[in-house]
Image (cartoon, rainbow, N blue to C red):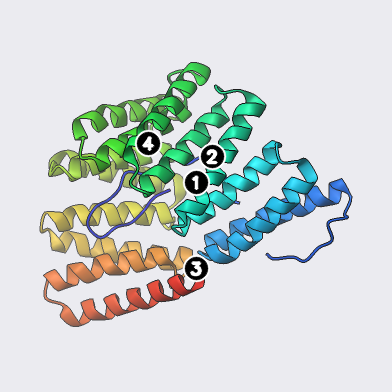
């Protein structure tokens, strides 16, 4: 999942969660096959609502899906765990960490009981729980979870599997947050090597790894090392996904932020403008990510003396944020 930010570009977590809702009033006396069909429809609705940023509505439908899953499959079934994991993800997205934590823990218990403690799905749940810990500032609790996930995937899948690259990136993110760049760098490099070998040098996953390593250098002021990585990530995204894909916009934004950090405002401005145009077209003019780009551009315009333009962009971003916040309540 890629995130835009005004000043610091976070490393990208590799999440292996289901981003799968519509509040339906139904009778719970449907046949089993009909109940399963309903569960799938609810999950599909969750995808749409989540993509629209309507997390509160998505959570309501996820609760309904969880009830259907429990009645249809049972409270120890993997499908029930999937619904529980999804609801936890939605809670986390809304900052409802206390609600999310027990759901993630219960999901982990179901996976461990059903498939064993060294199953790759268990590693995924460990990653999810660790990420929640990070969101709560519980860094000491996150590290052993990430390390255990890495050990499971290396043992079961092999040391050159893409899921191992995911685990390496996640652990690197934790070290990055702590400013432990020396510990994070070799993990990022190893993740990049794995993905280049397994997926090929032009795969979008490789672009993500390049971005992570670039961020690491960027925040140490190693701009000469960072710039070519950002540029290569941009090239991969354009070639693999097309020039109007949101990931291309993210790469443009990251490169613009790099130039902004160096005071290269003339180079940054057209990148922001193109990033904004892509995001507006792909996600809609009222999407929260559009607000992020607007905020970045507003900061740039302040620096170059375009105060009126900066104020307009900042107001528009604030309006989007307000609408988004109200919808999520």
> Comparing marks 3 and 1, which lies closer to the viewer?
1
Cα distance between the residues tagged 3 and 1: 19 Å
Percent x, y of residue 125 = 52, 36
Q: Earlier in the sequence, mark 1 or mark 4?
A: 1
- Residue at x 52% of width, y 18% of height: 156
Q: Earlier in the sequence, mark 4 or mark 2?
A: 2
Cα distance between the residues tagged 1 and 4: 12 Å
Q: Which residue is mark 3?
A: 328
Foreground of the two, 315 or 209 = 315
Figure check: 115 above or below 265: above
**Badge 3 element:** helix
Percent x, y of residue 266 = 15, 63
Q: Quadrant of residue 179?
A: top left
Cα distance between the residues tagged 4 and 2: 13 Å
Figure check: 59 above or below 9: below
**Badge 4 element:** helix
Figure check: 78 above or below 230: above
Q: Earlier in the sequence, mark 3 or mark 1?
A: 1
Cα distance between the residues tagged 4 and 3: 28 Å
Q: Which residue is mark 4?
A: 141
Q: Which residue is mark 2?
A: 105
Q: Earlier in the sequence, mark 3 or mark 2?
A: 2
Percent x, y of residue 313 = 28, 76
At label 2, counting other C-alpha atoms closer than 10 Å, the crowd grade (few under 14, some 14-19, many 20 or more) is: some
Q: Which residue is mark 1?
A: 101
- Residue at x 68% of width, y 51% of height: 66
Left or right: residue 107 versus residue 269 is right
Cα distance between the residues tagged 1 and 2: 6 Å
- Residue at x 31% of width, y 42% of height: 211
Left or right: residue 82 versus residue 257 is right
Foreground of the two, 21 or 217 = 21
> Comparing marks 4 and 3, which lies closer to the viewer?
4
């Amino acid at each position: 999942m890629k995130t835009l930010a005004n000043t610091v570009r976070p490393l990208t977590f590799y999440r292996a969660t289901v981003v799968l809702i519509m509040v339906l009033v139904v009778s719970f006396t449907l046949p089993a096959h009909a109940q399963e069909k309903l569960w799938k429809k609810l999950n599909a609705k969750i995808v749409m609502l989540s993509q629209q940023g309507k997390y509160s509505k998505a959570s309501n439908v996820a609760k309904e899906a969880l009830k259907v899953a429990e009645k249809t499959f049972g409270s120890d079934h993997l499908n029930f765990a999937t619904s529980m994991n999804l609801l936890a993800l939605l809670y986390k997205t809304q900052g409802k960490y206390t609600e999310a934590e027990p759901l993630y823990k219960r999901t982990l218990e179901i996976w461990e009981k059903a498939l064993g403690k060294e199953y790759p799905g268990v590693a995924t749940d460990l990653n999810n729980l660790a990420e929640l810990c990070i969101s709560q500032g519980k860094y000491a609790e996150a590290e052993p979870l990430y390390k255990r996930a890495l050990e499971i995937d290396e043992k079961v899948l092999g040391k050159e599997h893409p899921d191992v690259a995911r685990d390496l990136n996640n652990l690197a993110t934790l070290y990055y947050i702590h400013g432990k760049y020396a510990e994070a760098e070799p993990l990022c490099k190893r993740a990049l090597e794995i993905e280049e070998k397994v997926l090929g040098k032009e795969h979008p996953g490789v672009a993500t790894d390049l971005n992570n390593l670039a961020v690491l250098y960027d925040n140490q002021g190693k701009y000469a090392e960072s710039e070519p990585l950002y540029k290569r990530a941009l090239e991969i995204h354009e070639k693999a996904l097309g020039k109007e894909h949101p990931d291309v916009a993210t790469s443009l934004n990251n490169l613009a932020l790099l130039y902004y950090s160096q005071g290269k405002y003339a180079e940054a401005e057209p990148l922001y403008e193109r990033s904004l145009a892509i995001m507006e077209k792909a996600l809609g003019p009222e999407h929260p990510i559009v607000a992020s780009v607007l905020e970045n551009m507003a900061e740039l315009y302040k620096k170059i003396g375009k105060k009126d333009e900066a104020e307009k962009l900042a107001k528009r971003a604030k309006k989007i944020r307000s609408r988004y916040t109200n919808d999520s309540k």
